[in-house]
Image (spheres, helix red, strand yellow):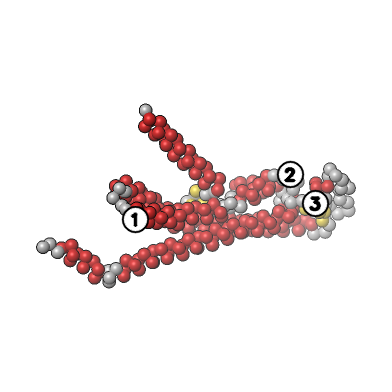
Amino acid sequence: QDLSGCNNTKFYVIATFGYFTNVLYIYLFYGATIVALVGLTYGTEMAYRMAECWTRRFSTLRRVTFQEEGTTPKQKMPTENNTSSNTNITPINSLGAAQMSEQLARDSAEQYLFMVEYMRQAGLVWSPVIVALYFYCFTLILLAIYVFIVYGSVLNTVTLIQSIVLFIIQVALYLVFPTLGLAHANSFISPMLEQFTNCAPEDFTMIGGREKWLAFLTDVPAAWTVWGIWITWAKIGAFLSTCVTGIATYLVTSSVLTRR
């Protein structure tokens, strides 16, 4: 009687210390993955909060201005038509106003450049990790498709359901979670740009002016990229809509050709 299969199994059990190394590998792998995702979540949340704090701090200076010494504020009496446009202007005494404006402009630029450098360094550090997670996830997707096509009819219902649940969890961990985290980190950049786009030309005088910041935000965006790829909610929505449209087109075309 051929006992080679039993001998191989016995040798494998002994070599793995009774499957201890397999269990240890699983725990270490998933533990490292969870730790990496927690670190990524903390980093993306920090990036989002920095952009949010910058916007809240300097958006209050939108209608703040100053005038030369010896002049009086040229403000109309608040009426029904000009209340919203004039009463928010806060004139500042000219003594130290120029220095104050210079310091505020410098402070806003330095904080924004710190945020830009933070996201650039975070992108350099996390890009290999995120790409490795994506590669592992797409490998699992291809493997799952192959197993489903070849062995789908052989698997029983319980095993098939367990495999599908495990597959969904892995895709959520390795693909969906990092992508949503990066989109969250970059989600406050668009409101920052919109607040300068949707304002009057004379707004934000205290921090350098509207045109300066529009050019600054466009030329030096604070974006967390993955090897140059900028992930945003708009791009995710466009990608999903393209996929849904493609799948729907394929299903409709297949059903029409089948009927013929």
- Taking the spot 27% from the left edge, 70% from the top edge, the residue there is 18
- The outermost residue toward the top is 260
Position of residue 90 measured from the top left corner of the image (x, y, whole percent): 81, 54
N-terminal of the pair, mark 1 or mark 3, is 3
Q: Which residue is mark 1?
A: 159
| Callout 1 touching callout 2 (CB < 8 Å) | no
The quarter of the displayed image where residue 50 is located? bottom right
Nearest to the observer: residue 249 or residue 259: 259
* Label 2: which secondary element: loop
Position of residue 9 measured from the top left corner of the image (x, y, whole percent): 21, 65
The quarter of the displayed image where residue 184 is located? bottom right
Instruction: Name the residue type under label 1.
Output: Thr
Residue 132 in view: no
Q: Which residue is mark 2?
A: 201
Position of residue 64 measured from the top left corner of the image (x, y, whole percent): 77, 53
Residue 91 in view: yes
- The outermost residue toward the left is 1
- Taking the spot 38% from the left edge, 30% from the top edge, the residue there is 259
User: Badge 3: few (under 14), some or many (20 or more) residues near its Cα, within 10 Å?
Assistant: few
Instruction: Name the residue type under label 2.
Output: Pro
Instruction: Name the residue type under label 3.
Output: Asn
Mark drawn on residue 88: 3
